[in-house]
Amino acid sequence: MAIQKTSLVEIAMDRIKTYILENKLKENDKLPTEKELIAKLQVSRTVVREALRSLESIGILKIKPGGGVFVGDSDFRSIKSILKHHYEAHGVKIRELVEIRKILELGALRLIIEKNLNVDFDYLESLNQEYYQAITHDLDTKKYDQLFHQHIIREADNETFYNFTEVIQEYFSLVKIDLMQSKKDLLASYKEHSEILAGLKDKNLEYSHKIMSVHFEPIFDYIYEMEGLKENGTN
């Protein structure tokens, strides 16, 4: 089945965002040229231009005629500032934040299945394989785990929902959670990613939700342990 043009644009948008994240680009950093992006993304010039314009419309990119493409900021800057101020003034209960993140990811799975969307399983599986390679070679695994979950939310095909989760992720990034996992635990996480994708392929919402909930258990266990130490006055 041929991929719809809009799907190609969305995929290109997501991969440009991934490029920004993986290369740790900041506001006003310059992106590759249009020609280089076409080669990297392996899509047409029209798709790249539409993706760039769409990202510019929500503030993620800034396009300067004759000057190139630069990293911008999203329309949610003011909201992020409010959240940052709230965090610095009042803090946040990490458990509640993770609960919200879990609800959002379960919601993304529901949207994908209920809307009968065509999911880019090849890309998701490639991210999961990069996650596996990072695990087996003792590299940084957090980046690929994050990209995998971000792309699942992107596949829900709801820009407002995706942008909202980005705001929550920004708040989440303010909280440092040093979850140390053994290689065995990480390999179990990799397998859970595969099972989540299998559930999506079968359009089995109950199974997908079950595996996603299991996937969140280690971080909840860690939080409950930290809360117990805090209540007991242990640093």
Image (cartoon, grey):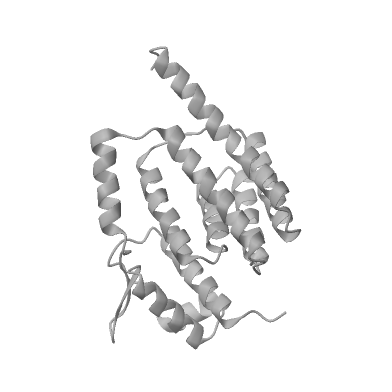
Residue at far front of view: 114
Q: Is residue 29 visible?
A: yes
Image label count: 0
Q: Residue at x 70, y 57 (%)?
A: 200
Residue at far right of view: 202
Q: The C terminus appears in which quarter of the rendering?
A: top left
Q: The N terminus appears in which quarter of the rendering?
A: bottom right
Q: Nearer the viewer, residue 75 or 39?
A: 75
Q: Residue at x 54, y 32 (%)?
A: 220
Percent position (x, y) of residue 221? 55, 28
Q: Nearer the viewer, residue 195 or 144?
A: 195
Percent position (x, y) of residue 204? 73, 54
Is 141 located above or below residue 34 in the figure?
above
Residue at far top of view: 232
Examine the image and state in which quarter residue 136 appears.
Answer: top right
Is 217 located above or below residue 39 in the figure?
above
Is 144 located above or below residue 228 in the figure?
below
Q: Residue at x 41, y 15 (%)?
A: 231
Examine the image and state in which quarter residue 187 appears.
Answer: top right
Q: Is residue 140 visible?
A: no
228 left or right, relative to 189 = left
88 left or right, relative to 170 = left
Q: Residue at x 53, y 75 (%)?
A: 41
Q: Nearer the viewer, residue 198 or 111?
A: 111
Percent position (x, y) of residue 164? 42, 56
183 left or right, relative to 14 = right
Is 229 located above or below residue 214 in the figure?
above
Percent position (x, y) of residue 110? 62, 55
